[in-house]
Amino acid sequence: MIYRVFHPAPSLCHIVDHYWYVCTQPGEIPEQQYFYTPLMQALCFTFKQQEECHELLDRTYMLNKPAYLFGQGTCPRIATSNGVDYLGVKFKPLGIAGITGINMEHLSNEIINVDDIWCNELELLWDQMQSMPSLESTINVLEDFLLKKYQSVTVDRRIDSARHAVELITQTKGNIDIKTLQNQTCTSRKTLERAIVHNLGITPKLYARIVRFNAAKNKLDSMLVDENITSIALDFGFYDSSHFISEFKTFSGLTPLGYLKKTEKDFIIKNH
């Protein structure tokens, strides 16, 4: 298995979190991979003619085209494949809106063929990327494309308010109320919600819940022997262990203890 991570150029660091490349042969990892509502919007390019199946919200997506966009999910996702070979772009929370200008509400819990957005431009980009001699040069071609898109697109006028609110939610690990967000961003409740839904795809309250879930899940991943579920629940702002278990099950499909037992056996490709 090959797994590599690349940092974006300074001109794109407010749009792109990082790039990742993964290549596995059949049998190297389990065919089914579970993704527990990650904080992720992504663009993925497949280098081999292969088919990958994704199950999301009782829908099945068969991915067999060169590139797909992943909107922010609000539930677990299951991917099934027999070996993978792709390059991914993990965007910052408002990154896709920043390079496409589209209403992200339409992309929430969706996986779409990039052809639907960039049409013939994708074919040219794909040809250029495949002709490059290294991953680094491939990413350089991709970054040139993303930067041109960012510089030419007309974005929603409320995107700065949305970005500020998202930063506050991230800094507080989801433990911030809407009234505080309004005051900090100098917007009304309705304006703030519309700005975030348009540029992120989901409401600020739901996004804060997902941020808090991910923070708590990351804590479980590094849980010490003397820690327990109740202490983690309180540390991350849940009312009690019952509230924590309910929220955790909503976003992972498992209880915290069930998650710990399952992830001892699962192999999960980070950030996918």
Image (spheres, grey):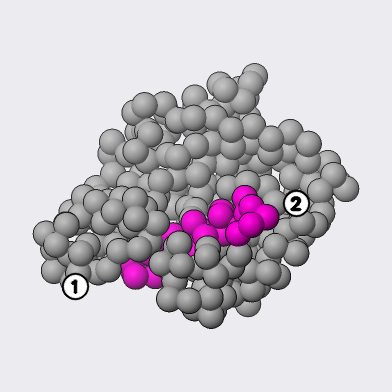
**Dot 1 alpha-carbon crowd within 10 angstroms: few under 14, some 14 to 19, many 20 or more:** few
Seen at 64% across and 36% down, the residue is: 21
In the picture shown, does residue 234 fall above or below 185?
Answer: below
Q: Which residue is mark 2?
A: 267
Residue 271 falls within the magenta-colored stretch: no
Residue 104 visible within the image: no
Kindly indicate the quadrant of the structure image that contains residue 183: bottom left
Say whether disc 2 or disc 1 marks the residue closer to the N-terminus: 1
Q: Residue 92 vs residue 199: left or right?
A: right
Q: Residue 4 vs residue 115: left or right?
A: right
**Magenta: predominant secondary structure element?**
helix
Q: Secondary structure at mark 1?
A: helix
Seen at 36% across and 26% down, the residue is: 10
Seen at 88% across and 48% down, the residue is: 27
Instruction: Write down the region rendered in magenta.
Output: 203-227
Q: Which residue is mark 1?
A: 190
Q: Which amino acid type corresponds to the residue marked 1 in the rendered image?
A: Lys
Circle 2 or circle 1, nearest the eye: 2
Location of the N terminus by quadrant is: top right
Q: Position of residue 92 (x, y in %)?
A: 40, 46
Residue 188 visible within the image: yes
Name the outermost residue toward the right: 27
Q: Which amino acid type corresponds to the residue marked 2 in the rendered image?
A: Phe
